[in-house]
Amino acid sequence: MNTAATESSLKKGEPVSWNAQCKDGRIIAVLSDTHGSLSAEAIEVLGNVDLIIHAGDIDTPDVLETLRGIARVVAVQGNMDGGAWTKGLSRTEVVEIEDVRIYVLHNIDRLDLNPRAAGFHAVISGHTHRPEIREDRGVLFLNPGSASWPKAKNPPTMALICVKEGAIKAEIVVLRPSSGK
């Protein structure tokens, strides 16, 4: 299993180059902590993805409806997600793409398994609103940050993952801050 992690800022038009880099692979967009809103720029980045993973704190069903209008969505329930609309959301999900297994949960502090021993290649979480990509003993850990409500002077962010030939590559996408915050 090969993992690669990079952080970079994508400017307008660069998702096309991401598509070229991931030619013949699967592109996954990763969001978390959107708290009821999605910027036009975030939606633009989602334009050519095969799957969207949302790591919780969605806050409203409207966000999920918008995402489902773009691509297939796998979402988990965050600590701020409540109400009847969340009945179909689990606290954890497993995503399998090609031979790559991804474990998704909202709060990494609630991880109750050894991902490597359980056969996972990546763990996706949110909650902190801070973007992070790291590798630990062959497992990629990804927090996309918050596309809508960043903390600690971080800009709004999301992530893109490329799964290709059994390898996984992740990249943080830096979005422009909205003018209303």
Image (spheres, rainbow, N blue to C red):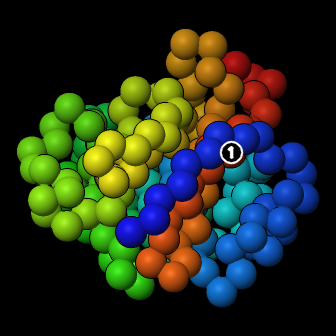
Q: Quadrant of residue 85?
A: bottom left
Q: Residue at x 32, y 43 (%)?
A: 136
Residue visible at 90% across and 59% down?
Answer: 13
Quadrant location, the N terminus: bottom left
Q: Residue furthest top?
A: 152
Q: Is residue 181 above or below residue 90?
A: above
The residue that label 1 is drawn on is 173
Task: Please tell me which residue lies in front, 96 or 49.
Answer: 96
Tally the marks. 1
| Crowdedness near tag 1: few (<14), some (14–19) or many (≥20) residues, C-alpha within 10 Å | many
6 sits to left or right of 20: left
Horizontally, residue 54 falls left or right of residue 137, namely right
Q: Residue at x 62, y 45 (%)?
A: 6
Q: Is residue 179 left or right of residue 46?
A: right
Q: Nearer the viewer, residue 114 or 106?
A: 114
Q: Amino acid at mark 1?
A: Val
The C terminus sits in image quarter: top right
Element assignment for label 1 = strand
Asked where in the image residue 166 lies, by quadrant, the reply is bottom left
Q: Nearer the viewer, residue 52 or 18?
A: 18
How far from the left and from the top, in percent, is residue 19?
75, 72
Q: Residue at x 36, y 32 (%)?
A: 127
> Does residue 80 sit above or below 90 in this rendering?
above
Q: Residue 46: where, in percent of width, then height?
A: 67, 63
Lateral position of residue 101 relative to residue 176, left or right: left
| Image height of 145 relative to 112, above or below | above
Residue 137, position as x, y percentages in the image: 29, 48
